[in-house]
Image: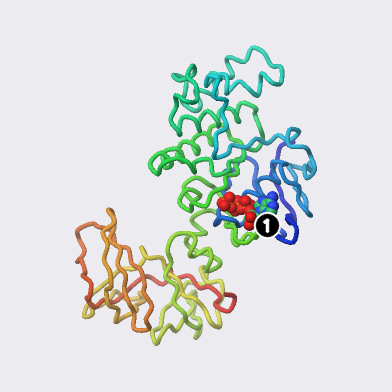
Amino acid sequence: MGGDLTLTSVTKRFGAFTAVDDLDLRVPEGSFFALLGPSGCGKTTTLRMVAGLDEPTTGTVLLGDTDITRLKPYKRPVNTVFQSYALFPHLTVADNVAFGLKRRGRRKIDDEVAEMLALVELQQLAKRRPGQLSGGQQQRVALARALINQPEVLLLDEPLGALDLKLRRQMQIELKRIQTEVGLTFVHVTHDQEEAMTMADTVAVMNEGRIEQLGPPEELYESPATTFVANFLGQSNLVAGSVTGTSGDLVHVEVHGARVFAGRSRSRVTEGDVWAGVRPEKVYLAGPGEEAADEVNSLRGGVVSDVSFVGVSTQYLVRMAWDQELTVFEQNTGARKRFRPGDQVDLHWRPEHTFLLDATQD
Ligand code: ATP
């Protein structure tokens, strides 16, 4: 088979409920693709249709040019790694990894098993049993066991969900390294935006059975297409406004009596009612008398309502005159003046960091 994985108009209904709704998706061969979305949005169902564990109600699943929509799971060159490792407790690590090959009657597999154990860095633990391994090590065994079958597509369903945060972060880097090394197509399901952005070349954000936006992580973060994506990927300040005109590359927006500018390339709309959005780390605070640099957007007359220290940065909540609280992250470099609750502040940021969303669609 080989080639891109393509889902076309895929719908999955369970009775009257539509779990996946007319989904179109293309996963380029050899890429690390993440399906990201909140619980119940249809990620796992999508993955199960690729694995052959669920059949689409309508639509097709292709691998390269081959239609695999109704192919039995074991006939697909696809393997899945789940959150529950489902290792055989009575077998050693090496035998767990060898299991798939042995079942297919293969002999002389020691080299392949050793190669897989080296890939996931478990050579030293080959003789142990799963009960003698940590969660992260067990997950590596599950990964090696899936990869030894040489699938063309590896599906990962919240594989790091059971690990603690630190181990999770380590395994994210590991998984990415392994994917680069083996060069297979990985489709990774997660509800953790940081995880998806750390690992994937392409992220598809799902909501209620549909894809809201698909693209490289930076693009989704810097130019979200919808308020859902803006809020699901990190934090956003979204201020209601309306477009008053354009000039050159800039769109002019009036927000609560102030004028701010947005770049056209980040603007989903260039007229009418909009949400003007800016990420908290793109905003900086200044005291009321302080002059801002030219060509910045300014919202004046805020009052700091909360300050929290978050290690590398400080998070400020700032209440605006129109009774909206905006969030600002400032790096703790020691160079900036710190503000306290009750202080009057102005918010400044560069026009190109503003994104505009259509407010009439929400
Ligand atoms: P989570 O992150 O919680 O696993 P998800 O995005 O993977 O969520 P799915 O497991 O794909 O979501 O489920 C999507 C929706 O379809 C949910 O509302 C779920 O209750 C429903 N659903 C899934 N499988 C079935 C089934 N076999 N019968 C009925 N409804 C189902």
Q: Which quadrant does the N terminus fall into? A: top right
Quadrant in the picture for residue 300: bottom left
Which residue is pictured at 62% across the width and 61% down the height? 208
Residue 25, visible in the rendered structure: no
Q: What residue type is labelled 1?
A: Ala
When the figure is inspected, residue 165 is found, relative to residue 76, above or below; the finding is: below
When the figure is inspected, residue 116 is found, relative to residue 225, above or below; the finding is: above
Task: State the image coordinates of residue 110 (x, y, percent, origin top left).
Answer: 58, 14
Pointer 1 residue? 19
Instruction: Specify whether 345 is left or right of 176.
Output: left
Which residue is pictured at 71% across the width and 60% down the height? 17
Please rate how many residues cluster around mark 1, counting C-alpha atoms within 10 Å: few if below 14, some from 14 to 19, many from 20.
many
Task: State the image coordinates of residue 124 (x, y, percent, origin top left).
Answer: 44, 19
Task: State the image coordinates of residue 176 (x, y, percent, origin top left).
Answer: 50, 39
Residue 114, visible in the rendered structure: yes
When the figure is inspected, residue 135 is found, relative to residue 288, above or below; the finding is: above
SS state under label 1:
strand
* Label 1 residue near ligand 1, CB within 8 Å: yes
Q: Which quadrant does the C terminus fall into? A: bottom right
Which residue is pictured at 25% across the width and 73% down the height? 286
